[in-house]
Amino acid sequence: MLLSLCAAVLSALLLLAAFPAAALAVETIVLTAGEPYITAIAGETVDLTRYAVTLNGATAAPESLVWKNGGQAVSSFTPAGAGVYPLTAESGSASATIYVVAKNESDAEYVLYANDFADADALSGLRFITGGAALCEIEDGALVLDATTLNGPEVAVLLPEWLDDFGSYRVEASVAVRNTADDSCWSSLTFRTQSDGQRCYQMLVRRNAAAADGLRLRMRTIAQEWQTLATARAGSALNEGEYHTYAVEVKGSAMRGCLDDVPLLYSNALSAYSEGGLGLCVQYGRMYVDELRVTVQENTPTQPADPALTETSKVSPVASALGFYAVYNSGSIEACLTGAQGVVVSVDEELRVCETSGGTPVYTLD
């Protein structure tokens, strides 16, 4: 047995000698424009020598890179807690900021930025690109963009500049609109905004979100023209002052837009701009943003299912092009009508309404 064990060890050593690179190879991960980040768990060490970085359009191999943390050369980094930590990757005269985005092990998402607009300090870092800072304020714990004045039809703001380095993210905002001029007025999330503050992608939501183009994905071109990439309609219009959740998920050339957690918009043609700023914009109205959150988008967005029948948790379990509908399970059927345009019921052969779970008849359709 001892001879067999020695023979096995000798064979393993011979294999390592013959194929040292294969035995010790570590996968190289390339960090590209639009995704300049490394995800990590708080307290765990990141080996920076595993990463190549795209610099000025060319890929710098791991062995050519010098990593720096605050000017000090490092080969690894350990995030102390959940948060975003900027490092510098250098190769020759080229360099880029790479962000270590850490979460706690129990967290579901890697958070890039979050703001609940609790006080005036929440305005720090925001960039007021259309309408000016005078038309943006904190009011009762919400960011307010006021496009109801005579200064212009739109007000727009961008999030802090360091987020411009990213192009793959999920941005979610709780939004209410008031004092709109008419049903066609809109509020929006903008993303991948270019350095001129004009060229960008935009998911806009009209007050009449149930219109054929109640939601629209569009792109501002280099010719300063708007090009529509996708449209969709929600189940109902937005009530004045009622908060709704807007969300944009974007990675690579794919984008999915959601209203109240219902995926509605989709395009895989976002090739013009690979990264850029995130922002908010409103036309002819007051846009209230109660909270906003930007997280890493790890998976490529996929096309939503047929919106003719889509689950939603905002008002009731089912949404269709005609509005939001509740699904009756048991108890009072009248209670299902709260906040819904109708009720979906189960019936037996005698057209009696039955409880979904047990099939017990509870109503007749007389």
Image (cartoon, grey):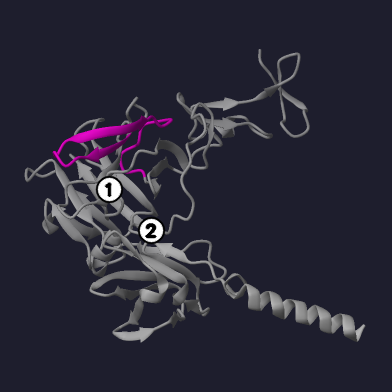
In screen coordinates, is 343 left or right of 154? right
In screen coordinates, is 351 left or right of 52? right
x, y percent for residue 102: 46, 71
Q: Residue furthest right?
A: 1
Judging depth in this view, the residue of 123 and 139 nearest the camera is 123
Residue placed under numbered mark 1 in the picture: 273
x, y percent for residue 263: 46, 39
Q: Does the magenta-highlighted stretch encompass residue 227?
A: yes
Residue under the image location 66 percent in, 12 percent down? 366
> The magenta stretch spans which residues?
216-242
Question: Type of residue at label 1?
Answer: Tyr
Q: Does the magenta-highlighted stretch encompass residue 47?
A: no
x, y percent for residue 86: 34, 74
x, y percent for residue 105: 56, 71
Look at the numbered disc 1 and give the secondary structure of its residue: loop
In screen coordinates, is 347 left or right of 253? right
Q: Image quadrant of residue 359? A: top right
